[in-house]
Amino acid sequence: MIFDRVKSLDAILAAAGTKALPRTLGAFHLTMLGVGAVIGTGIFVLTAEAAQKAGPGMMISFVIAAAVCAVAALCYAELAAMVPVSGSAYTYTYAVLGEPLAWMVGWALVLEYAVAAGAVSVGWSGYVVGLLSHVLGIGLPASLTLGPSAGGPVNLPAALIALAVTGLLVIGTTESARVNAVLVCVKIAALTAFIALALPVMQAENFEPFAPLGMGGISAAAASIFFAYVGFDAVSTAAEETRNPQRNMPIGLIGSLAICTLFYMAVAAGVIGAVGATPLMTPDGAAIAPGSAALTAACEGVANNAVVCSKEALAWTLREIGWPQIGNLVGLAAGIALPSVILMMMFGQTRIFFVMSRDGLLPEVFSSVHPRFKTPHVITMVTGVFVALFAAFFPVGALADISNSGTLFAFALVSVAVMVLRRTDPARPRPFRTPAVYVIAPVAILGCAYLFFSLSAYTLMLFAGWATLGLVIYFGYSRSRSHLGRGVLEVPEAEPEAPPVPVPPI
């Protein structure tokens, strides 16, 4: 029951031809899409949460998260090059481990993409609200900028940016990729400016004590800031729209991850060395949970003079070291560029749903393509509404941790799939092969499990509830409507034969 209904790779490739998306993206586009998806709320905002959990030890947290992503990326690259169609981890699992597990991966990817898009929207809202206050002296009311957990009714700016990105995605993939490339350049310029100004004023004493909460704090921070790397796999969801995917997909996946890791390490060193990153503690020496009311109270007690209290960590750091105008520009850059992360997260989510609909696991209307824009417009608009609701009512930290749980689950199953496929289909051409696969893939699985169980008990409970709901939907609706289960073989329609040319009489 668990491993039944395996859909062959040939059937998956044939099904892609029935409702194919145009191939318009090259290696540069894919790398920029990956960088656009990865560099965002994780480094601009969640640096503060990592500092509260690990202090300067968050440097090690970034290394741990990057290492897990790197080995997972190598597994993704092999499968993405072999199966250049939309669907990412969902499609790969369907081809190797069967439909029930594929459904669970697709269901978990809702946490990775849609919930992550909501988290980034909340992060964007924090930067824009802070920028308006510092630069223009405009203080937006809490009733419009804070969700229920923060003491307000709704975060309206976060919801509005999610809806604006939805409109852009409906217009077209190429147009979205062009806008994304511009926004990526803005983000890289902002981070480069931060590194250039923060690293020269580093002080060794700011790195001590390096791990005030021990390895437990470092692990907890790694599990949270894993969100900072989420998105590189969204590149694989664009495989069906990529020119020469066998060459360009591995370049996009591994190239974007390498670029982002270098930036993250330099930025983390700049924050810690310039202003320190000491967690705020209760009087009895216990750590205060990030995002809690107790931390808010502690921040008020220190006049917001700590990076762990800042909703705009990088901009705040530059203001503290004497560069207020540059700090405001970094805040402006974040406000301009963070929508590119929302764009890629929603792009990935819509492509997952598109393929699940094409397989019959979701209503067929979700795989309809707009006659003019050539995009899956219906599911894009539905996804946009849900992302806007997430952003309006939930805090960034909670959304990030929930997103990580789904991502880690999907990454682990992809790592299993690449090993299984080496055994079950060894002769299939592999334009990119994961090196030392029987070492790399198990390391990826163990790394994902380590970070997964480093998440809070509350997050793990939410994941269990989400998985249970997914199983109910699968066995109550999707299993009976699955094209594979009903024996519906999808193959591209053959071109009609041209009528015979009449031969004139001699």
Image: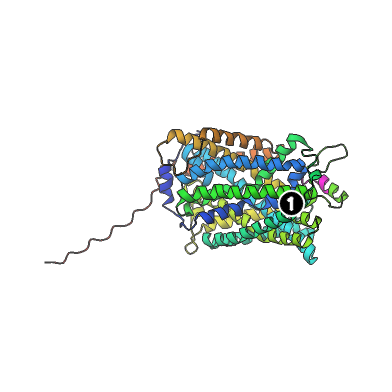
Closer to the camera, 224 or 14?
224
125 relative to 209, above or below: below
Tag 1: amino acid? Leu
**SS under mark 1:** helix
Q: Is residue 310 visible?
A: yes
Q: Nearer the viewer, residue 129 or 468?
A: 129
User: What range is drawn magenta here?
Assistant: 290-296
Q: Residue 393, how many percent across, how many down?
A: 71, 52
- How packed mark 1 is, by other alpha carbons closer than 10 Å (few <14, some 14-19, many 20 or more), is some
Q: Position of 35 compared to 130: left or right? A: left
- Residue 179, position as x, y percentages in the image: 58, 62
Q: Residue at x 73, y 44 (%)?
A: 50
The residue to which callout 1 is attached is: 199
Q: Residue furthest front?
A: 200
Q: Nearer the viewer, residue 458 or 113?
A: 113
Q: x%, y% of residue 171?
A: 54, 63
Q: Position of residue 121 (x, y in %)?
A: 67, 55
Left or right of 503 in this view: 413: right
Quarter that holds the C terminus: bottom left
Decide if residue 469 is on the left or right side of residue 286.
Answer: left
Q: Is residue 293 one of those drawn in magenta?
A: yes
Q: Is residue 424 above or below residue 269?
A: above
Query: Could you tell me how many numbered marks the image carries?
Result: 1
Please state which of residues 453 and 213 is positioned toward the viewer in this rendering.
Answer: 213
- On the question of residue 53 being in view, the answer is no
Furthest residue to the left?
506
Residue 425: quadrant of the picture:
top left
Classify residue 410 by image quadrant: top right
Q: Residue at x 68, y 52 (%)?
A: 41
